[in-house]
Structures are given as structure tokens and as C-alpha cells.
Image: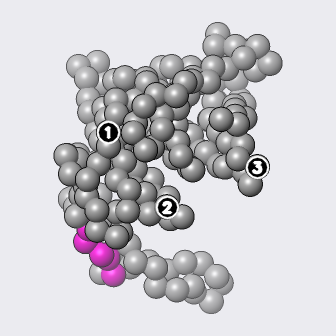
Amino acid sequence: MAYGFFRYDFQGLDAKGNPIYSADKITVLDKPESVNKVARVCYLDDSDTLIIGEEGRNEEDLPSMRHISRVFVCKEYLAGNRETVSFVPGPGHETGCVAAVGDYAFTGGWKTRGKIWVNRLSDGAEVGSFDPGETVGGVEKTGWIDLLTGINAFMRSTGEYLVFVEENYKAKSLIYRWKP
């Protein structure tokens, strides 16, 4: 949140099965080392890994655009570690969203037209990127990734990664399949 780093604590389910959260039931958390202004957060429960996209702006930004200038990875976060590994995402100052699962982080940009960059969580190293292919019209027929949550990533039991990318220019979703 803009005024602190905390989580809403789960209070159970209501009579209809909806989760209950309350503004007065929060846990204040310490930000990992070197993190300034938080733009996005991902947490991987299975590995106690916190991924933070730090906000950064450039001169051409519209007031509503919140770019990610750096991604920080903090392993064993709830266990008390605050040391981070960080990297500058592939889309540079155009980075708008980040998703993470398994051993990788996936970033995409406002104007990068469906291209997704892949970085290792262990050291931040860039592994490669995915580009929209001809089966979806290529880059020319692909729009901006302009949602803050424009990427979702999942890892299948086979080790294959599925990366879903919003693309509303031509009313489609991009799906990248990858097995490292």
C-alpha cells in the first residue's frame, strides 16, 4: 500500500463462502532491503519468496501509468530474511507488470506488444523472452500490455510453464508454453 507495507489478515469465510478481511486486522511487515516505492507484489507461498516491482517513472509517463523500474526478489521472507537479489526488467522503463512462479519471473511492458521477458528468481539473470508469433498475428497485430495484472503465470506438474498475457487490441489472450 502507498502508506505502508502490510498484509490484510484472513478472518475466515462469511455465510456465503466469501473471504473476510478487515482494515483493522493487518500485519505490518518490513520491506526487504533496498526497496523504496512498491508498485507490484507477488508472493510464492510454496517457497516463501516475495517478489516486488519497484515503481519508477519517466518524463513521458501519463499520471496514471505506474512503471516498474526494478524487480526485487527476497527468498525466505516470512522466515525473516530481508536480503534481496534484483534486476532491471527486460522492457526497461516500459515495464508495467510482473508475475512469478516456480523459479522464474515474467515481465511485460506497456508498449512492448505482447513480448514477455523471463528472469531467474535465484540471481535475477535474464533467461530469454517470448514474442507473439504469426499464429496470433505477430507483433503488428498485438496491443499493449496495459493492465497492472496483465500477466499470469502457472507451472504445471510436468515442469512446463504457462504464461497468460492480456491483449485487448484484437480481443485475444496470448498463451506462451515453455519448458526450460
Q: Is residue 128 magenta?
A: no
Q: In the image, which residues are magenta?
A: 25-29
Q: SS for tag 3?
A: loop
Q: Identify which amino acid the numbered label 1 is placed on.
A: Ser
Q: Is residue 107 above or below residue 4?
A: above
* Residue 143 image point, x, y percent: 59, 21
Q: Is residue 53 above or below residue 96?
A: below
Mostly what secondary structure, the magenta segment? strand
Instruction: Compare residues 137 and 162 and report the one nearer the observer.
Output: 162
Q: Residue at x 48, y 38 (%)?
A: 120
Q: Identify which amino acid the numbered label 2 is placed on.
A: Ser
Q: Earlier in the sequence, mark 3 or mark 2?
A: 2
User: Is residue 82 in view?
Assistant: yes
Instruction: Compare residues 122 and 142 and report the one nearer the observer.
Output: 122
Give the image quarter of residue 9: bottom left
Work out how far the residue at label 1 is from the one at label 2, CA to CA, in angstroms: 17 Å
Residue at numbered disc 3: 158
The numbered disc on residue 86 is 1
Q: Identify which amino acid the numbered label 3 is placed on.
A: Thr
Q: Earlier in the sequence, mark 1 or mark 3?
A: 1
